[in-house]
Amino acid sequence: MNNTKTKQGVEKRPAKITKFISLPKFIISKLENSISNNKPSFRFNNSLAYFFLHLIAIRRFSDPDCDECFRGFVSLDSKLLEHYSYNYRKYFRYFTDNGILEKRIYSKDKNRANSFRFIYDLEIDCKEFVKMDISSLQKLKNFKLIEKFTGKDEKCSHLVKWFYEGLEIDSQQAILEAQKEPNFLKRQSYLFGVEKLKNKEFWFTRNKVSDNRLHTPLTNLSKKLRNYLRFKGDKLVNFDVRCSQPYFLIVLIESIYNTVGTLMFENLKYLLYSSGFRKEYSKIKYWILNSDFYTEMSKILFEGREMSLTRNEWVGKGRNKEKKTVTYENERELTKKLILRLFYIDTNGYLYRNDSDFKVFDKKFPCFSDFLKELKKNNYKYLSKLMQNKEAHCILDVITKRLNQLYPKMPLFTIHDSIMTTEYWAERTSLKKLIQSMMLEENRVKPQINN
């Protein structure tokens, strides 16, 4: 079968599906009532309808900003939908005509793509879910029924296997925790995430042409709910790299120093070896590896300035952007967001050139700022991709694989730069020190590890 490319240029193979998927009961009831009272005028496949509705539901869970920022609207790739069924437009028209989904029309003025959301009759928590059998989709050419994921495609079998060998969630306590969330749509996503984990409905993706990270049901699970994860009844503990993205920027810079003679980084040679850059880099490197980088940076950025912790910011990606009012707990949290934006933003764009905080950074660290701009000169996404790929390779392909070889019975889970295992194994292996020593050996710089 020919692979299909999405708008992002990623080739799509047959969708791997398991026999059952969970959906909110009220959505299934709406669909069944619609079919009874207003029979579809086209050849309607119930399983395909469930699958399409599930794409909306799962995206809302997997994207933590989706509900809060976009009022529950989800943008789906039309090329991908067409790959699943050339009749997809008829299904989504039927959903909107029958009050199951609401559609937000594509707008060039607001730079948005068509998107959809569930229609809730009342803001009543959806605590009831239904498991739907979609195994009949295997008869269609673009679906492949599997019993479970192996992780072979993602080259992460050493991690994926543990999901099926004992990962659990204390659903009763997790539901109580989820119900404390004041935002209605966000709360629904929390409840849906708990249901997925309870039913062991797992999925795994890793895209080497983008961030190369492993995405799983744990990736965007709220930190509030992670406390209720268990492995065969044992509580999980988490070890993550402190100031992860800045740390992997240091790893990147050190690797450039070691390969600066290559054509790839030839243009950076002058910047890297200038006395101004070395002085600024030495200070930043020390803060990242030995101090609290964001606290130290906040002292520099906000020196002599009164800063409001409440701001209006653009959130979202691509065409789906909206302004949102955000209030930060303290200057450190605000600084963390600013630094991450600095890594990801287009330094040739309007938002960067007219941002007062970035102007302060340019003034305080002119050589380091020039270095970041040079890296992003041809493609502003290049820097973030380099850092994420460094992180993914380090955590997924090196550290966790070595840990699995040393301790094959130790369960391992990851959330980007974080590594999780049980309290027993963390203590038995002195895992914090072990991760540090392995990362020092691999990257030549020793990270700080939080747990």
Image: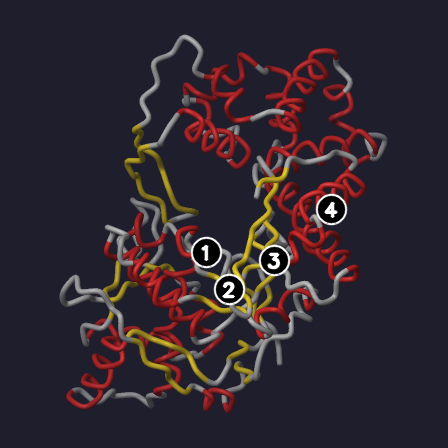
Side (left or right) of 69 relative to 141:
left
Mark yes or no: residue 56 visible. Answer: no
Mark 4 neighbour class, 10 Å CA radius: few under 14, some 14 to 19, many 20 or more: some
Q: Earlier in the sequence, mark 1 or mark 3?
A: 1
- In the image, which is nearer the foreground, mark 2 or mark 1? 2
Asked which quadrant contains residue 273, the reply is top right
User: In the rendered structure, which amino acid carries the disc numbered 3?
Assistant: Thr
Lower sequence index among marks 3 and 4: 3
Q: Distance between the residues labelled 3 and 2?
A: 9 Å
| Mark 1, secondary structure of its residue | helix
Residue 389 drawn above or below residue 229: above
Q: Can residue 315 be seen in this view?
A: yes
Residues under labels 4 and 1: Cα distance? 23 Å
Horizontal relation, residue 102 to residue 345: left or right: left
Q: Quadrant of the N terminus?
A: bottom right
Q: Name the residue under label 1.
A: 226
Is residue 198 shown left or right of residue 116? right
Q: Residue 434 carries which label?
A: 4
Query: Which residue appears farthest toward the right when viewing the image?
Result: 261
